[in-house]
Image (tube, grey):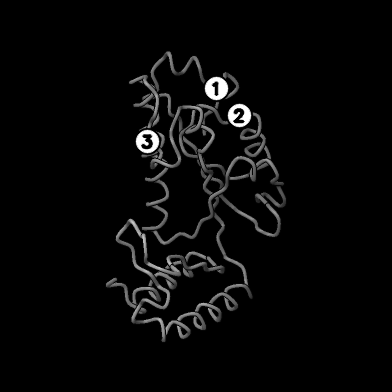
Amino acid sequence: WATTLQDMKAHLDTLGTHGANFFAPQALYYTLDGLRKHATSLFHQNPYWEHFHLLSDYAGRLAHLLCQGHQVADIALLDPVTSLWAHLAHPLHNWSYVGYDPDEETLTNHLVADWACIARALYQMQRPFQSLDPALLAQAKIIDRQLQIGKTRYKVLIIPPSPIWNAKHLISYAHLSMQVVSSSPWDYCPSRIFKRAHRSSRDFRG
């Protein structure tokens, strides 16, 4: 209940700087009767409700402005979601391991940590980037030595350590002079986990 319009505007501005152009506020409760958690309501129960239209108008103007252009980000960071699923990382539990194999848990923790480390480093260097999942990458084309998806082009593709990427696609990018930055997870990958990984990627090195 201590949330102010200034706090909410700060959240909007942060989302906007990351390219978001659609904002959907939550916690607008019709009634607080029976509410089992100590949550803020942004609806008529909130003292700021009578001024909320000012924030809504600002969000609308911000969204319209951000829809007029496109994000300039020439770096694509591949999302290792397929590797995390394959090694039992749960997306609804902060990608924590939900299996029973201590070696696989070690591998999973490394995959998550390396992915987060790369993203954090790009933020700290103020290098705009976009995350791509493998399904989007499969739709990409190489045009003028750049990775193109829809109207967006990337000069660099960063691939976090992963034991199951399809080496055929990655090597094809290299052959077409696409700049690919990758590293291998084998230094910390136990041998029995390695044997379960796709053999198609075992010889790839970025």
* Residue labelled with disc 3: 96
> Where is the N terminus found, in terms of image quarters?
bottom left
- Identify the mark nearer the N-term, 3 or 2: 3
Say which quarter of the image contains residue 152.
Answer: bottom right
Where 163 falls versus 176 (above or below)? above
Residues tagged 2 and 1 counted as in contact (Cβ below 8 A): yes
Specify few, some or many for label 3: CA neighbours under 10 Å numbering under 14, 14-19, or 20 or more. some
- Compare marks 3 and 1 and give the one earlier in the sequence: 3
- Label 1 environment density (alpha carbons within 10 Å; few <14, some 14–19, many ≥20): few
Question: Tag 1's secondary structure?
Answer: loop
User: How many marks are shown on the rendered structure?
Assistant: 3
**What secondary structure is found at the residue carrying circle 2?**
helix
User: Which-is-in-front pick, marks 3 and 2?
Assistant: 3
Please state which amino acid type lies under the numbered disc 1. Asp
Specify the label residue 203 is tagged with: 1
In front of the other: 144 or 138: 138
Disc 3 is placed on an element classified as strand
Q: Quadrant of residue 91?
A: top left
Q: Residue at x 65, y 49 (%)?
A: 147
Residue found farthest to the left: 2
Q: Residue at x 38, y 18 (%)?
A: 190
The residue carrying mark 2 is 167
Residue type of the residue flagged with mark 2: Ala
**Residue 82 in the image, given as x and y percentages of width and height:** 54, 34
Q: Considering only vertical position in the picture, is 165 above or below 180?
A: above
Q: Residues within 10 Å of mark 2 (few under 14, many from 20)?
A: some
